[in-house]
Image: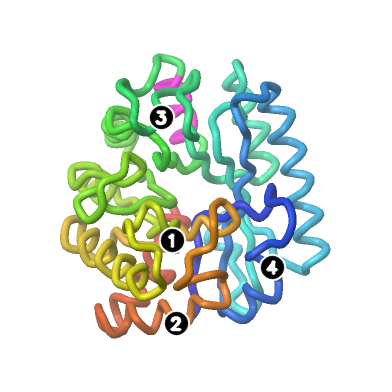
Amino acid sequence: MKYIDLHADALTKEGVRSVTKESLSAGNCLLQCFAAFVDGTKGEGFARAISLCDTFDEMCLKNSFNPVRGGAEIDSERINALLTVEGGEAVGDDLENLAVLYERGVRMMTLTWNQSNKIGAANGTAGGLTPFGRDCVERMCDMGMLVDVSHGSDGLLSDVAVVCKRKGAPFVASHSNARAVFFHSRNLTDRGIRAVAESGGVVGLCFVEKFLAADGSAERQRAAILAHARHIVNVGGEDVLALGSDFDGALENPYVKSPADLPKLLFDLEKTFGARVAEKIACKNALRVLGK
């Protein structure tokens, strides 16, 4: 079974990477999203994002990945790669920069990272979208760039839901889990899961150990991933769950250490949900959203 992963940090990972051509091939990856991570504490976010666009282009050429800008460009016989941005600091002070990023191939942007910015409030903080942030989300909806609320506050997610509903656009949480299963500010409330589902978007199941469970053993992490998956489907329906590993963005999970371990997870998802729903989680739900 092929899969789509909505978030990995291989573009900015220093040292040995989990996400490589070899591990993606071993995992039978259909499409990997590569995040251009912009650290808001360093300034010059737009210049940093453009530099990482160049890095993405070079990586695709070196590894013979197929760079895509939408679902229609996906080649089922190749490893496809989609460029995203993590951190709205990439926009800087000028929303016209969104058009430049879009032209470079960016099709999804995580509005915040772990600190609030000019767009809105980060996880664990009060507040939602700023006026600038509302304008940013509206512009993204108009141009066809997916709004990603992972790392955002509960208020930011609620505000995004209002704007996207008015625009008739889906939004996503590319790498998030369920707060009702394990309490962490990075995980979504049931209300948040339902809001993503109602927009037609997806929640990418995240493999970061500290967001899944307190116990870091491989077996407990396996059980936790499946518990989060079941809860998200129970709350939001079978069309809402996708995969968003966060490979190379955190310590490796002992159960799924790299893309090469995805067949093992997909087998467990098939045993849990059946083949039809497991295929939705693996790729079809994400394909539906990317197709829009």
Circle 2 residue: 264
Task: Decide whether the magenta segment is chiefly helix, strand or loop.
Answer: helix
- Residue 206 location in percent, x, y? 41, 57
Asked where in the image residue 77 lies, by quadrant, the reply is: bottom right
Circle 3 residue: 122
Nearest to the observer: residue 231 or residue 280: 231
Circle 1 residue: 207
Numbered disc 2: secondary structure: helix
Q: Is residue 136 magenta?
A: yes
Dot 1, crowdedness within 10 Å: few (<14), some or many (≥20)? Answer: many
Give whichever of discs 4 and 2 has the lower sequence position. 4
Q: CA distance from mark 3 to mark 1?
A: 20 Å
Nearest to the observer: residue 104 or residue 264: 264
- Residue 119 location in percent, x, y? 46, 22
Amino acid tagged 2: Lys
Amino acid tagged 4: Thr
Q: Which residues are magenta?
A: 133-142
Circle 4 residue: 20
